[in-house]
Image (tube, helix red, strand yellow):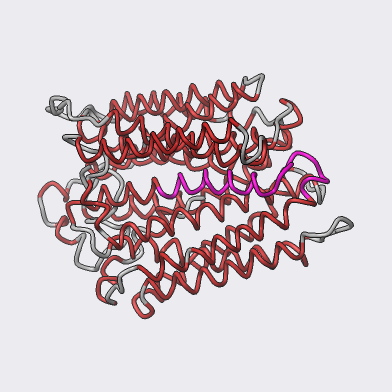
Amino acid sequence: MSTSVHDPAPHGSHPSPHAPRSHQHSPESEVRRPWTTLALMLAAQVMVVLDVSVVNVALPSIGADLQLSSGDYQWAVSAYVLLSGGFLLLGGRLADLFDRRRMFLIGLATFTLGSLASGVAGSALMLIVSRGAQGAGAAMLTPAAMSIVMTTYAGRQRATALGLWGTVASLGIAVGVLFGGALTTAFDWRAVFFVNVPIGVAVLVGVLRAVPAPRGARAARRDLDLPGAFTLVTGLLAFVYAVESTDSHGWTAPETIVAAVAALVLLTSFALNERRATAPIVPPATWRIRSLVTASVVMAGVTGAVVGAIFLSSLYLQQVMGSSAVVTGLQFLPLAAFITGSAAVASHLLPHTGAKALIAAGLVIATAGALFLAMSLGGVDADPAYVTDVLPGFALLGFGVGPMFVAISVAAMTDVPHERSGLASGLMMTGHEVGAALGVAVLTAVGGDLTTRAGLVAGTPDAYLAVAIGLVALLVPTALMPKATAAATAGHGHGHGHRHGHH
């Protein structure tokens, strides 16, 4: 995958001071392009980013309406992130091989129709399938949009565009939870999905009118690794089903065993396929880049912890503490503010501390937050108060997580050759999305019945304890990271951090 797809390297939102200058004196870069294209791409990306968190706050209302089980709750979140993450690398490859404008339009149409179908869903199954369609659309749309931004703008305009792109990504969680709460309270949970339809149609029309088709579009080369994409996504779906099934059916149930075996077979065949494919989604040499592999594992784990905690807390705040959907949205704002604020501070500390030390410190602080929540939200006769029992835990989680998103992105890129940075960034994003799906699945399995107040009171402490254990375990891959030099760290700058922080 070319660097134009996901990754702001060679062009991080603020890479090394010398990087963007090289564009500014070429004749092409002196041409100022209208911001219309960026506005359209950002509008589409906002929908994609919001749709991860916007559903969390609406879940109790959806659950009451469609009689969802705990497993259905989990799949309403996981179906979206698993398909958007699983197909992301294929989406990037498609954007490289085919006309990126056409790929963007196909992805946007798929996402918009998936949103419409989610809004009219009358059953748990229809909702989950529609969420999957949204995710598949997002996987095609995001890399193509990034590619269009990268090829449309140059020089200072490109730096501005990437800064805005990163801001949208990092603010997604806060705005999504708040927006979801406001829509659910003002109208109905279906509004959370319906709101995407007019935006999707408007962006579609705008792109057809304002964004020209690329001149001399390359002839489609047929080196697409479709078996790789298929075995990866179905293997991940089977794996997440097996994890969730340990709670709903039991460890030794036929459903759990069959799903676990299917996941093993599919993911093994993915690994074997990548060795034989002419143009593998993930070239085998990629797995030998230690900085990228260890950082992607930590990224998946941290995202799983954060998205899982938000999923769990939104249910707890509404069904145990009695907050309305919109109040729950407001109660998440401090968490988002702590993540964003500490990420900003971390990007200044990075050159002095190095990425590895920052990640280790973040893991310790976030673990303290999870342990605090495990203790303060426990007890059958618990009558927790937001300010004393929830907010301190959110503060610690946010302070721990913010610096990690910045540092992990930098650590990942330490040993990656320049021409592979697009692929590397795509792999990080895949880890991010798959981690989110796994986090929600594991916490659902540990927490037990999340559909009732009694179930949440009993299961939440165990689930937060699982978050704490998971975060401590991530100290192992962190220790295995190569020690990045301060110079490399400074050179990579903040460009990647916010790009990934959007859950």
Residue at image point 58% right, 58% down: 336
Q: Is residue 387 magenta?
A: no
How many numbered circles does the render carry? 0
Task: Measuring from the top left, give residue 337's x and y in whole percent.
Answer: 58, 61
Q: Quadrant of residue 315?
A: top right
Region in magenta: 431-456
Residue at image point 62% right, 34% down: 253
The correct choice, above or below, for 440 with respect to 384 in the image is: above
Task: Measuring from the top left, give residue 6's x and y in whole percent.
Answer: 31, 46
The answer to whether residue 40 of the structure is visible from this angle is no
Residue at image point 83% right, 46% down: 454
> In the displayed image of the protein, which residue is found farthest to the bottom?
352
Task: Measuring from the top left, give residue 322's x and y in whole percent.
Answer: 82, 47
Front in this rendered view, residue 355 or 115: 355
The correct choice, above or below, for 30 with respect to 131 in the image is: below
Front in this rendered view, residue 438 or 76: 438
The answer to whether residue 296 of the structure is visible from this angle is yes
Q: Quadrant of residue 217?
A: top left
Front in this rendered view, residue 425 or 263: 263
